[in-house]
Each structure stands twice: as structure tokens, then as C-alpha cells.
Image (cartoon, rainbow, N blue to C red):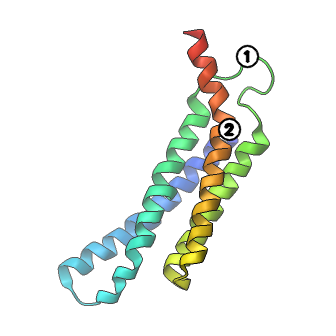
Amino acid sequence: MPTLSIFFIRASLIYFLIGITIGAILLAEKGLSTYSSIWVLRSAHIELALFGWIIQLVMGTAYWILPRHPEGPPRGNQYVAWLAFILLNSGIILGVSAIWLLNNPDLEAIARLVQFVGIGCFAFVIWPRVLTFRKEN
């Protein structure tokens, strides 16, 4: 398994643990109704579960499992793929900070843009491998 896939999958599992912990707190609050201001964490929970866990797990698995290039670097430009990892995780951390700690919609929009650019970088790296697979079959 490539190192980048290991990083994607490990990061997704970390986000999964954080997201499930926040989700359990929210679920307990829903049943107990003792501390209603905890619902501020709902958006952060969604951010961590969707972008942190699911999207990153899919990206790590795709980077590992899709067919390799017959010539050149087997998985495409590794630097752009690492840039995608860094941008996606920076966007997630910035997004959770903007939602939960700072309550800043402008910073949240910037976080979404950083995540979008990270996913775009990943698509740039992975798409030729998808096309190569389609040409062989």
C-alpha cells in the first residue's frame, strides 16, 4: 500500500473517532436534554464525518486500488497527490475551527474552497488512471 494511502486512511480513522465521539455526545444530549448549547457541535460533526472520514477513506482507497500507469510514475504526480492530502486536511481543520470555535462564515467559505481545491488536485492525479483502465477493457 502506498504511503499516501496509509496517511489518507489513518487520517480518516482519526476523524471517524472524533466524529463518532461528537455524535455520541449529541445523541446523549438529545435523550437527556441537559445542555442544549452542545448542538453547536452538529455542523462540526457533519464536517468531520463527511469530509474527514468518508471522503478521505474513499480517496485513500482509490489512490491505492486503481490501476497504475504503464509508463512513468505508477500512480501519477505524487507531489500533487500529497498537496491534495494537505489541502483537504487543512480545509477540514479550518472548517471545524470556523464553525465551532470562531463562528465565522467567511472563514468557513475559505475552508470549503481549500477542500474543493484539494479534491480537484486529487481528481487531477487520479483521472488518468481511470481513463487508462477504461482503454484497456
Q: Earlier in the sequence, mark 1 or mark 2?
A: 1
Q: Percent from the top left, x then y, of residue 48?
A: 47, 63
What residue sits 44% from the left and 56% below the top?
50
Mark 1 is on which residue type?
Pro
Q: Percent from the top left, x then y, of residue 106?
A: 59, 76
Q: Percent from the top left, x then y, of residue 43?
A: 42, 71
Regarding residue 1, the answer to whether it shows in the image is: no
Mark 2 lies on residue: 124
Mark 1 lies on residue: 70
Is 135 left, or right, of 73 in this rendering?
left
The quadrant where residue 73 appears: top right
Measure the C-alpha gap from mark 1 to mark 2: 18 Å
Q: Looking at the picture, tell me which residue is in the foreground, 34 or 83.
A: 83
Of the 4 image quadrants, the one containing the N terminus is top right
What residue sits 57% from the left and 55% below the top?
11
What residue sits 35% from the left and 84% below the top?
38
Image vertical order of residue 2 relative to residue 100, above or below: above
Looking at the rendered structure, the secondary structure element under dot 2 is helix
Image label count? 2
Single out the residue that lies furthest toward the left: 31
